[in-house]
Image (tube, rainbow, N blue to C red):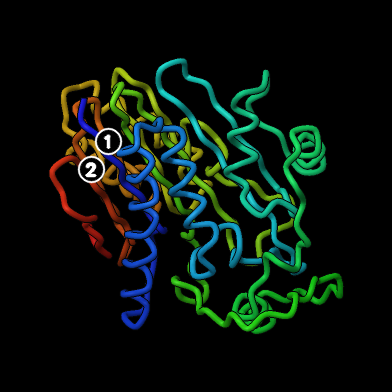
Amino acid sequence: MGLAIVVHGGAGSIDPDRYDAAQSGCAEAAESGWRVLRSGGSALEAVQAAIIALENNPGFNAGTGAVLTADGRPELDAGVMEGRDLTVGAVASVQRIHNPIVLARAVLTSPHVLLVGDGAETFATECGIAFCDPRDLITPAQYARWQRGYQDGDDVNIEPSESEDFTQPIHSDGDRHGTVGAVAMDASGLLVAGASTGGIGAKHPGRVGDTPLPGCGYYAENALGGVSCTGHGEDFIRLLLARRALDFVGLGLTAQQAASAAIGLLGERVGGHGGLIMIDRQGRIGAAHNTATMAHAYMTDGMSGPFAGITA
């Protein structure tokens, strides 16, 4: 089997002056995962490495730099699935975890599928995953956005820690499509898909979208492929869009054809907006969106470096 990895930094509206940052951030994430694959690592390790790179980039809406809830808090969701045994790990509404994808992977190796809030953070303690100060997840740029448009009158917000990082968000103010994600295939043919997000800016505390839900925001099955989605989560949940995309592969479509068909269904059936990335069981890449832009990057065997783009 050939090696392949594809990542996305979210579908939505990206200002032209942020195109370079979006493309370079996705390219760096793809390279992080590719190095794992080239060194003999698993697709699970590669997806984790790629998503960590995106979570650590303050321009993307995941991990550090995530958008804030209506009351000014970071609440992070993440999920990952491997396609051989259909094992899943996911977390939602965590506030003290620097890299939620690491905690999601820990859940994957447990008897559980999804842990939320305080329970998820208790599990992190049991696994030896350190907490961070929630303020360390809030960049000055995202705090300023919350002050401009997210504030709902409650004085319970958390101010950011002292930081010289004034990196501007990749997506425009008011954009509702900021998930990041990755899909990888390793030398054994294992397919893995994952996603991570801060959710929707000014969301109600406790709101959970598609990102941690298998079949909605991501899915992997070796017989078909792997998918990671980005968009308005409620619409992806209603359609189980990640799984539907793989059903199109099962009907004989390529990864690109299936991605386009799934996004077409999103618009036609519920008027939804977003995008997704795919790898099918032959290792072919697919990417589609019905938003103005979608930041993404990929690498496959024979490429000297990643391809990175803003539109599919």
Is there CB contact under 8 Å for labels 2 and 1? Answer: yes
Looking at the figure, which quarter contains the C terminus? bottom left
Three-letter code, disc 1? Ile
Query: In terms of sequence position, does the residue under pointer 2 or pointer 1 come before the other?
Result: 1
**Picture disc at residue 279:** 1
Residue for point 55% across, 58% down: 62
Label 2 neighbour load within 10 Å: few <14, some 14-19, many 20+: many
Query: Residue 278: image x %, image y %?
Result: 30, 39
Q: Is residue 19 above or below residue 287?
A: below
Residue 22 picture location, percent across and down: 37, 68
Residue 201's x, y, as percent? 60, 66
Circle 1: is it few (<14), some (14-19), or many (20+) Cα within 10 Å? many
Side (left or right) of 21 relative to 123? left
Taking 19 as reference, is 211 left or right? right
Marks 2 and 1 sit apart, C-alpha to C-alpha, by 6 Å
Q: Residue at x 21, y 57 (%)?
A: 307
Farthest left residue in view: 302
In the image, 266 versus 55, the foreground residue is 55
- The residue wearing badge 2 is 286
Residue in the image at 49% along x and 70% along y: 59
Judged from this view, the residue extending furthest toward the right is 155
